[in-house]
Image (cartoon, helix red, strand yellow):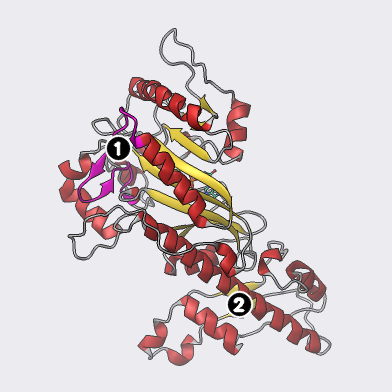
Amino acid sequence: MKCIATGIDNPDSNLGCYAMTPSDYSDFSGFFDKVIRDYHGDISGKKQHVTSWEVKGVYDVQKIGLENLSMRVRVGRNLIGTKLPGMMSQKDRIDFEKKMLPMFDKLISSYGGKVVSLSPNLGIDTPNPNLIDEDQYLSLVKDHIMFKDMTADPYLKSAGISNHWPYGRGCWYSDDKSKIIWFGEEDQLRIMCMDVGTDLIAAFNMLKELLTVMESMEDIKFAKDDNYGYVTSCPSNLGTAMRASVHIKCPLLTAEGSVDKVKIICSKLGLSVRGVGGEHTPIGKDGTVDLSPSSRLFVTEAQVIESLYNGIEELTSIEKKVFSFIHNVVEENEDKNTEERDDTNNVNYVLINDSSKNQSDEASEQRDNITLLKEKARMKKFSKRTLSQKALPDIKERLSISSQSPSELKISPSPILTIKNE
Ligand code: ADP
Ligand code: MG
Protein backbone atom coordinates (compact mmCIF):
# COMPACT_ATOMS: atom_id res chain seq x y z
CA MET A 1 0.00 0.00 0.00
CA LYS A 2 2.87 2.37 0.76
CA CYS A 3 4.47 1.62 -2.62
CA ILE A 4 1.34 2.50 -4.59
CA ALA A 5 0.01 5.35 -2.40
CA THR A 6 1.44 7.98 -4.74
CA GLY A 7 -0.52 6.57 -7.70
CA ILE A 8 -3.75 6.40 -5.72
CA ASP A 9 -3.38 10.00 -4.55
CA ASN A 10 -2.16 11.28 -7.94
CA PRO A 11 -3.93 9.64 -10.88
CA ASP A 12 -1.85 11.73 -13.29
CA SER A 13 1.38 10.19 -11.97
CA ASN A 14 3.48 8.45 -14.66
CA LEU A 15 4.20 5.24 -12.80
CA GLY A 16 2.24 5.71 -9.60
CA CYS A 17 4.60 3.77 -7.38
CA TYR A 18 7.91 3.92 -5.52
CA ALA A 19 9.93 1.23 -3.77
CA MET A 20 10.31 1.62 -0.02
CA THR A 21 13.25 -0.75 0.44
CA PRO A 22 15.76 -2.11 -2.14
CA SER A 23 14.28 -5.60 -1.80
CA ASP A 24 10.74 -4.42 -2.70
CA TYR A 25 11.57 -4.99 -6.36
CA SER A 26 12.01 -8.71 -5.70
CA ASP A 27 9.61 -9.07 -2.74
CA PHE A 28 6.75 -7.55 -4.76
CA SER A 29 8.01 -8.66 -8.16
CA GLY A 30 4.53 -9.79 -9.23
CA PHE A 31 3.61 -6.13 -9.31
CA PHE A 32 6.89 -4.32 -9.94
CA ASP A 33 8.18 -6.58 -12.72
CA LYS A 34 5.09 -5.82 -14.83
CA VAL A 35 5.31 -2.09 -14.17
CA ILE A 36 9.04 -1.99 -14.91
CA ARG A 37 8.99 -4.03 -18.11
CA ASP A 38 5.95 -2.17 -19.39
CA TYR A 39 7.43 1.28 -18.66
CA HIS A 40 10.90 0.40 -20.00
CA GLY A 41 9.53 -1.34 -23.09
CA ASP A 42 10.72 -4.92 -22.55
CA ILE A 43 8.25 -7.04 -24.53
CA SER A 44 10.33 -10.20 -24.04
CA GLY A 45 9.86 -9.96 -20.26
CA LYS A 46 13.33 -11.45 -19.81
CA LYS A 47 15.83 -8.65 -20.27
CA GLN A 48 18.55 -8.21 -17.66
CA HIS A 49 20.30 -4.90 -17.17
CA VAL A 50 23.97 -4.60 -18.15
CA THR A 51 26.27 -1.83 -16.88
CA SER A 52 28.88 -0.37 -19.25
CA TRP A 53 30.63 2.98 -19.36
CA GLU A 54 32.64 2.05 -22.49
CA VAL A 55 32.06 4.95 -24.85
CA LYS A 56 33.04 4.35 -28.46
CA GLY A 57 32.31 7.50 -30.47
CA VAL A 58 33.26 11.17 -30.23
CA TYR A 59 30.39 13.14 -28.77
CA ASP A 60 31.44 16.74 -29.22
CA VAL A 61 28.56 19.05 -30.16
CA GLN A 62 31.01 21.30 -32.04
CA LYS A 63 30.64 18.72 -34.82
CA ILE A 64 27.02 19.83 -35.23
CA GLY A 65 27.85 23.51 -35.10
CA LEU A 66 26.92 24.12 -31.48
CA GLU A 67 28.84 26.12 -28.96
CA ASN A 68 29.21 25.60 -25.22
CA LEU A 69 26.26 23.92 -23.51
CA SER A 70 25.53 23.46 -19.85
CA MET A 71 25.72 19.74 -19.16
CA ARG A 72 24.84 17.61 -16.20
CA VAL A 73 25.09 13.86 -15.71
CA ARG A 74 23.63 12.36 -12.56
CA VAL A 75 22.98 8.95 -11.12
CA GLY A 76 20.75 7.91 -8.25
CA ARG A 77 22.28 5.55 -5.67
CA ASN A 78 21.05 3.90 -2.47
CA LEU A 79 22.99 1.83 0.03
CA ILE A 80 22.33 -1.87 0.48
CA GLY A 81 20.46 -3.04 3.56
CA THR A 82 18.82 0.33 4.26
CA LYS A 83 15.34 1.74 3.93
CA LEU A 84 14.72 3.88 0.87
CA PRO A 85 13.66 7.53 1.49
CA GLY A 86 9.91 6.73 1.44
CA MET A 87 10.26 4.62 4.61
CA MET A 88 12.94 6.53 6.49
CA SER A 89 12.11 7.99 9.90
CA GLN A 90 13.46 11.39 10.92
CA LYS A 91 16.17 9.59 12.90
CA ASP A 92 17.06 7.42 9.87
CA ARG A 93 17.49 10.57 7.80
CA ILE A 94 19.73 12.27 10.35
CA ASP A 95 21.73 9.06 10.85
CA PHE A 96 22.23 8.78 7.10
CA GLU A 97 23.49 12.36 6.93
CA LYS A 98 25.89 11.70 9.83
CA LYS A 99 27.08 8.47 8.17
CA MET A 100 27.92 10.38 4.99
CA LEU A 101 29.95 13.14 6.68
CA PRO A 102 33.25 11.16 6.88
CA MET A 103 32.80 10.20 3.17
CA PHE A 104 32.38 13.84 2.28
CA ASP A 105 35.51 14.68 4.30
CA LYS A 106 37.44 12.27 2.07
CA LEU A 107 36.01 13.91 -1.04
CA ILE A 108 36.86 17.36 0.33
CA SER A 109 40.48 16.23 0.76
CA SER A 110 40.58 15.40 -2.97
CA TYR A 111 38.24 17.93 -4.55
CA GLY A 112 37.75 20.65 -1.93
CA GLY A 113 34.35 22.23 -1.48
CA LYS A 114 31.97 21.88 1.43
CA VAL A 115 28.88 20.25 2.87
CA VAL A 116 25.73 22.30 3.24
CA SER A 117 22.74 21.01 5.14
CA LEU A 118 19.16 21.99 5.88
CA SER A 119 18.82 19.78 8.97
CA PRO A 120 17.86 22.11 11.85
CA ASN A 121 19.96 19.90 14.13
CA LEU A 122 21.60 16.49 14.07
CA GLY A 123 19.64 15.20 17.08
CA ILE A 124 18.64 16.62 20.46
CA ASP A 125 21.40 18.92 21.74
CA THR A 126 23.48 18.24 18.63
CA PRO A 127 23.82 21.38 16.54
CA ASN A 128 24.39 21.03 12.81
CA PRO A 129 27.73 22.62 11.82
CA ASN A 130 26.78 22.69 8.14
CA LEU A 131 23.38 24.36 8.53
CA ILE A 132 22.63 27.07 5.98
CA ASP A 133 19.90 29.70 6.10
CA GLU A 134 16.95 30.15 3.74
CA ASP A 135 18.71 32.72 1.51
CA GLN A 136 21.80 30.56 1.10
CA TYR A 137 19.59 27.59 0.27
CA LEU A 138 17.57 29.50 -2.36
CA SER A 139 20.71 30.82 -3.98
CA LEU A 140 22.10 27.24 -4.24
CA VAL A 141 18.81 26.10 -5.84
CA LYS A 142 19.06 28.97 -8.32
CA ASP A 143 22.62 27.88 -9.18
CA HIS A 144 21.39 24.30 -9.86
CA ILE A 145 23.44 22.99 -6.93
CA MET A 146 20.75 22.18 -4.35
CA PHE A 147 17.41 20.51 -5.00
CA LYS A 148 14.03 22.16 -4.69
CA ASP A 149 11.73 22.03 -1.67
CA MET A 150 10.43 18.47 -1.89
CA THR A 151 7.25 19.16 0.06
CA ALA A 152 5.93 21.04 -2.96
CA ASP A 153 5.98 17.81 -5.00
CA PRO A 154 2.70 15.91 -4.47
CA TYR A 155 4.12 12.65 -5.88
CA LEU A 156 7.00 12.57 -3.41
CA LYS A 157 4.74 13.71 -0.60
CA SER A 158 2.23 10.87 -1.02
CA ALA A 159 5.10 8.38 -1.09
CA GLY A 160 6.51 9.68 2.20
CA ILE A 161 9.75 10.60 0.39
CA SER A 162 9.54 14.26 1.42
CA ASN A 163 8.63 13.46 5.05
CA HIS A 164 10.49 15.23 7.85
CA TRP A 165 11.67 17.94 5.46
CA PRO A 166 14.19 19.54 5.86
CA TYR A 167 15.87 16.94 8.13
CA GLY A 168 18.59 14.90 6.45
CA ARG A 169 18.63 17.08 3.34
CA GLY A 170 21.71 18.72 1.90
CA CYS A 171 24.64 18.26 -0.41
CA TRP A 172 28.38 18.29 -0.85
CA TYR A 173 29.83 20.27 -3.72
CA SER A 174 33.41 20.51 -4.90
CA ASP A 175 35.42 23.74 -5.00
CA ASP A 176 34.77 24.25 -8.71
CA LYS A 177 31.10 23.19 -8.27
CA SER A 178 31.53 20.57 -11.00
CA LYS A 179 30.92 17.64 -8.63
CA ILE A 180 27.82 17.52 -6.46
CA ILE A 181 26.31 14.86 -4.20
CA TRP A 182 22.80 15.39 -2.89
CA PHE A 183 21.65 13.51 0.18
CA GLY A 184 18.04 13.01 1.23
CA GLU A 185 16.27 13.71 -2.06
CA GLU A 186 14.28 11.07 -4.00
CA ASP A 187 17.19 8.65 -3.61
CA GLN A 188 19.52 8.54 -0.62
CA LEU A 189 22.22 9.90 -2.90
CA ARG A 190 22.14 11.71 -6.22
CA ILE A 191 25.67 11.93 -7.55
CA MET A 192 26.29 14.34 -10.42
CA CYS A 193 28.83 16.25 -12.47
CA MET A 194 28.23 19.51 -14.27
CA ASP A 195 30.25 21.11 -17.01
CA VAL A 196 29.95 23.90 -19.52
CA GLY A 197 31.53 22.84 -22.78
CA THR A 198 30.99 21.01 -26.03
CA ASP A 199 32.33 17.55 -25.26
CA LEU A 200 29.56 15.48 -23.67
CA ILE A 201 32.09 12.93 -22.48
CA ALA A 202 33.79 15.39 -20.11
CA ALA A 203 31.02 15.41 -17.48
CA PHE A 204 30.40 11.69 -18.10
CA ASN A 205 34.03 10.75 -17.39
CA MET A 206 34.18 13.04 -14.39
CA LEU A 207 31.17 11.24 -12.92
CA LYS A 208 32.69 7.84 -13.66
CA GLU A 209 35.80 8.86 -11.71
CA LEU A 210 33.79 10.24 -8.80
CA LEU A 211 31.77 7.01 -8.56
CA THR A 212 34.94 4.93 -8.58
CA VAL A 213 36.32 7.00 -5.69
CA MET A 214 33.08 6.57 -3.75
CA GLU A 215 32.83 2.84 -4.39
CA SER A 216 36.33 2.42 -3.00
CA MET A 217 35.10 3.70 0.38
CA GLU A 218 34.48 0.98 2.93
CA ASP A 219 31.02 2.07 4.00
CA ILE A 220 29.66 2.66 0.53
CA LYS A 221 27.95 -0.36 -1.00
CA PHE A 222 25.40 0.62 -3.61
CA ALA A 223 22.24 -1.49 -3.86
CA LYS A 224 21.99 -3.36 -7.16
CA ASP A 225 19.41 -5.80 -8.48
CA ASP A 226 20.35 -8.72 -10.76
CA ASN A 227 17.64 -7.84 -13.25
CA TYR A 228 17.19 -4.10 -12.87
CA GLY A 229 20.69 -2.75 -12.17
CA TYR A 230 21.11 0.06 -9.64
CA VAL A 231 18.17 0.31 -7.26
CA THR A 232 16.31 3.61 -7.08
CA SER A 233 13.12 4.73 -5.33
CA CYS A 234 11.31 5.28 -8.60
CA PRO A 235 11.12 2.36 -11.07
CA SER A 236 11.65 4.86 -13.90
CA ASN A 237 15.23 5.46 -12.74
CA LEU A 238 16.33 1.82 -12.35
CA GLY A 239 19.24 0.44 -14.34
CA THR A 240 21.77 3.14 -15.02
CA ALA A 241 19.80 5.53 -12.74
CA MET A 242 21.43 8.05 -15.03
CA ARG A 243 19.96 11.26 -16.38
CA ALA A 244 22.34 13.01 -18.77
CA SER A 245 21.04 16.41 -19.75
CA VAL A 246 21.96 19.55 -21.63
CA HIS A 247 20.39 22.97 -21.55
CA ILE A 248 19.76 23.84 -25.17
CA LYS A 249 17.98 26.70 -26.91
CA CYS A 250 15.03 25.91 -29.18
CA PRO A 251 13.75 29.46 -29.79
CA LEU A 252 11.61 28.64 -32.80
CA LEU A 253 10.02 25.40 -31.67
CA THR A 254 9.17 27.10 -28.38
CA ALA A 255 8.19 30.42 -29.98
CA GLU A 256 4.70 30.37 -28.54
CA GLY A 257 6.12 30.21 -25.04
CA SER A 258 5.08 26.56 -24.90
CA VAL A 259 7.22 23.46 -24.82
CA ASP A 260 4.57 21.26 -26.47
CA LYS A 261 6.14 21.09 -29.94
CA VAL A 262 9.58 20.25 -28.59
CA LYS A 263 7.97 17.55 -26.45
CA ILE A 264 6.17 16.01 -29.44
CA ILE A 265 9.37 15.89 -31.47
CA CYS A 266 11.52 14.75 -28.56
CA SER A 267 9.20 11.91 -27.61
CA LYS A 268 9.89 10.46 -31.08
CA LEU A 269 13.60 10.86 -30.43
CA GLY A 270 13.42 9.09 -27.05
CA LEU A 271 14.16 12.32 -25.19
CA SER A 272 12.48 13.94 -22.21
CA VAL A 273 12.06 17.67 -21.96
CA ARG A 274 12.15 19.62 -18.70
CA GLY A 275 12.30 23.28 -17.75
CA VAL A 276 15.48 25.16 -16.89
CA GLY A 277 14.91 24.68 -13.16
CA GLY A 278 14.46 20.92 -13.60
CA GLU A 279 11.34 18.77 -13.54
CA HIS A 280 8.00 20.60 -13.30
CA THR A 281 9.58 24.02 -13.98
CA PRO A 282 9.00 26.33 -16.97
CA ILE A 283 11.28 26.60 -19.99
CA GLY A 284 13.62 29.59 -20.27
CA LYS A 285 12.37 32.85 -21.78
CA ASP A 286 14.92 32.41 -24.59
CA GLY A 287 13.54 28.95 -25.40
CA THR A 288 16.10 27.02 -23.35
CA VAL A 289 14.98 23.52 -22.42
CA ASP A 290 16.53 20.67 -20.44
CA LEU A 291 16.91 17.71 -22.76
CA SER A 292 17.79 14.17 -21.62
CA PRO A 293 17.37 10.61 -22.93
CA SER A 294 14.31 8.97 -21.38
CA SER A 295 15.77 5.45 -21.20
CA ARG A 296 17.65 4.43 -18.08
CA LEU A 297 17.06 0.66 -17.83
CA PHE A 298 18.18 -2.03 -20.33
CA VAL A 299 20.56 0.52 -21.86
CA THR A 300 24.16 1.08 -20.87
CA GLU A 301 25.57 4.32 -19.47
CA ALA A 302 27.49 4.71 -22.74
CA GLN A 303 24.25 4.40 -24.73
CA VAL A 304 22.64 7.15 -22.64
CA ILE A 305 25.34 9.60 -23.76
CA GLU A 306 25.12 8.37 -27.36
CA SER A 307 21.31 8.92 -27.38
CA LEU A 308 21.75 12.39 -25.93
CA TYR A 309 24.21 13.34 -28.65
CA ASN A 310 22.03 11.89 -31.43
CA GLY A 311 18.97 13.64 -30.01
CA ILE A 312 20.74 17.00 -29.87
CA GLU A 313 21.85 16.53 -33.48
CA GLU A 314 18.35 15.70 -34.68
CA LEU A 315 16.63 18.47 -32.74
CA THR A 316 19.19 21.03 -33.90
CA SER A 317 18.60 20.06 -37.51
CA ILE A 318 14.82 20.41 -37.08
CA GLU A 319 15.22 23.82 -35.44
CA LYS A 320 17.41 24.86 -38.40
CA LYS A 321 14.78 23.65 -40.87
CA VAL A 322 12.08 25.62 -39.10
CA PHE A 323 14.37 28.62 -39.32
CA SER A 324 14.73 28.26 -43.11
CA PHE A 325 11.01 27.63 -43.41
CA ILE A 326 10.07 30.81 -41.58
CA HIS A 327 12.82 32.74 -43.33
CA ASN A 328 11.45 31.76 -46.75
CA VAL A 329 7.87 32.51 -45.78
CA VAL A 330 8.79 35.96 -44.55
CA GLU A 331 10.69 36.64 -47.78
CA GLU A 332 7.71 35.47 -49.87
CA ASN A 333 5.28 37.60 -47.95
CA GLU A 334 7.50 40.62 -48.22
CA ASP A 335 6.94 40.52 -52.00
CA LYS A 336 3.19 40.25 -51.67
CA ASN A 337 2.36 42.26 -48.66
CA THR A 338 1.19 45.31 -50.54
CA GLU A 339 -1.66 43.30 -52.05
CA GLU A 340 -2.56 41.09 -49.13
CA ARG A 341 -3.27 43.07 -46.05
CA ASP A 342 -4.81 41.92 -42.91
CA ASP A 343 -5.37 44.09 -39.91
CA THR A 344 -5.82 41.24 -37.51
CA ASN A 345 -2.09 41.25 -36.90
CA ASN A 346 -2.31 37.50 -36.93
CA VAL A 347 1.12 36.03 -37.53
CA ASN A 348 0.28 32.40 -37.58
CA TYR A 349 1.64 29.90 -40.05
CA VAL A 350 0.04 26.53 -39.83
CA LEU A 351 2.07 23.54 -40.82
CA ILE A 352 -0.49 20.82 -41.29
CA ASN A 353 -0.79 17.30 -42.48
CA ASP A 354 -2.96 16.96 -45.59
CA SER A 355 -4.83 14.24 -43.76
CA SER A 356 -8.12 14.99 -45.51
CA LYS A 357 -6.58 13.75 -48.75
CA ASN A 358 -4.90 10.74 -47.29
CA GLN A 359 -7.29 9.40 -44.73
CA SER A 360 -7.53 5.98 -46.34
CA ASP A 361 -3.79 5.72 -46.63
CA GLU A 362 -2.74 3.98 -43.44
CA ALA A 363 0.99 4.36 -44.00
CA SER A 364 0.56 8.05 -44.51
CA GLU A 365 -1.44 8.36 -41.32
CA GLN A 366 1.39 6.79 -39.44
CA ARG A 367 4.06 9.13 -40.67
CA ASP A 368 5.58 10.66 -37.65
CA ASN A 369 5.70 14.34 -37.00
CA ILE A 370 9.38 14.69 -37.65
CA THR A 371 9.17 13.22 -41.12
CA LEU A 372 6.16 15.40 -41.70
CA LEU A 373 8.02 18.48 -40.57
CA LYS A 374 10.98 17.68 -42.79
CA GLU A 375 8.78 16.97 -45.79
CA LYS A 376 6.67 20.03 -45.34
CA ALA A 377 9.61 22.32 -44.83
CA ARG A 378 11.20 20.96 -48.00
CA MET A 379 8.12 21.04 -50.19
CA LYS A 380 6.85 24.28 -48.73
CA LYS A 381 3.33 22.97 -48.95
CA PHE A 382 1.88 24.73 -46.01
CA SER A 383 -1.33 26.51 -45.56
CA LYS A 384 -0.70 30.16 -44.90
CA ARG A 385 -2.71 32.72 -43.19
CA THR A 386 -2.01 36.27 -44.08
CA LEU A 387 0.79 38.13 -42.52
CA SER A 388 -0.02 41.69 -41.76
CA GLN A 389 2.32 44.35 -42.96
CA LYS A 390 2.35 45.77 -39.49
CA ALA A 391 3.63 42.49 -38.10
CA LEU A 392 6.40 42.04 -40.63
CA PRO A 393 9.07 44.26 -39.14
CA ASP A 394 8.17 42.77 -35.80
CA ILE A 395 8.63 39.18 -36.89
CA LYS A 396 11.85 40.07 -38.69
CA GLU A 397 13.18 41.66 -35.57
CA ARG A 398 12.18 38.71 -33.44
CA LEU A 399 13.80 36.24 -35.79
CA SER A 400 16.91 38.36 -36.39
CA ILE A 401 16.62 37.36 -40.03
CA SER A 402 20.12 38.53 -40.81
CA SER A 403 21.52 35.87 -38.51
CA GLN A 404 22.07 32.48 -40.09
CA SER A 405 22.58 30.69 -36.82
CA PRO A 406 19.36 29.59 -35.15
CA SER A 407 21.12 29.52 -31.81
CA GLU A 408 21.55 33.28 -32.11
CA LEU A 409 17.91 33.99 -32.87
CA LYS A 410 16.13 36.33 -30.56
CA ILE A 411 12.46 35.68 -30.26
CA SER A 412 9.70 36.77 -27.97
CA PRO A 413 6.99 34.37 -26.88
CA SER A 414 4.30 35.02 -29.46
CA PRO A 415 2.45 32.78 -31.91
CA ILE A 416 4.53 32.29 -35.03
CA LEU A 417 4.32 28.71 -36.09
CA THR A 418 1.84 26.02 -35.32
CA ILE A 419 2.68 22.40 -35.95
CA LYS A 420 -0.34 20.22 -35.71
CA ASN A 421 0.25 16.88 -34.08
CA GLU A 422 -1.64 14.25 -36.02
P1 ADP B 1 17.02 15.15 -11.56
O1 ADP B 1 15.61 14.69 -11.28
O2 ADP B 1 17.63 14.50 -12.74
O3 ADP B 1 17.93 15.05 -10.38
P2 ADP B 1 15.91 17.83 -11.81
O4 ADP B 1 15.06 17.87 -13.02
O5 ADP B 1 15.24 17.75 -10.49
O6 ADP B 1 16.97 16.66 -11.99
O7 ADP B 1 16.90 19.06 -11.81
C1 ADP B 1 17.79 19.26 -10.75
C2 ADP B 1 18.61 20.49 -10.94
O8 ADP B 1 19.58 20.26 -11.96
C3 ADP B 1 17.80 21.70 -11.40
O9 ADP B 1 18.33 22.86 -10.77
C4 ADP B 1 18.09 21.76 -12.87
O10 ADP B 1 17.96 23.05 -13.41
C5 ADP B 1 19.54 21.32 -12.89
N1 ADP B 1 19.97 20.84 -14.20
C6 ADP B 1 19.55 19.75 -14.88
N2 ADP B 1 20.18 19.64 -16.05
C7 ADP B 1 21.05 20.69 -16.12
C8 ADP B 1 22.00 21.13 -17.09
N3 ADP B 1 22.20 20.45 -18.21
N4 ADP B 1 22.69 22.25 -16.83
C9 ADP B 1 22.49 22.94 -15.67
N5 ADP B 1 21.63 22.57 -14.72
C10 ADP B 1 20.91 21.45 -14.94
MG1 MG C 1 14.12 14.67 -9.83
**Magenta span: chief secondary structure:** loop
Q: Residues within 10 Å of mark 1 (few under 14, many from 20)?
A: some
Q: Is residue 109 magenta?
A: no
Q: Does dot 2 land on a helix, a strand or a loop?
A: helix
Residue plotted at (56% across, 74% down): 419
Residue 231: x, y in percent?
A: 29, 43
Disc 1 versus disc 2: distance between alpha carbons?
45 Å
Residue plotted at (52% across, 69% down): 313
Does 245 appear above or below 222? below
Checking the image for residue 321, the label placed there is 2
Q: Is residue 118 left or right of residue 323?
A: left
Q: Quadrant of residue 75?
A: top left
Residue 42: x, y in percent?
A: 24, 62
Which numbered mark, 1 or 2, is in the foreground of this view? 1
Does 333 appear above or below 403? below
Residue 10: x, y in percent?
A: 37, 46
Residue plotted at (46% across, 16% down): 121
Q: Would residue 386 be seen by someone viewing this image from the given angle?
A: no
The amino acid type, in three-letter code, at marker 2 is Lys
Mark 1 or mark 2: whose residue is earlier in sequence? 1
Residue under pointer 1: 222
Q: Is residue 234 magenta?
A: yes
Q: Which residues are magenta?
A: 215-236
The amino acid type, in three-letter code, at marker 1 is Phe
Does 162 appear above or below 419? above
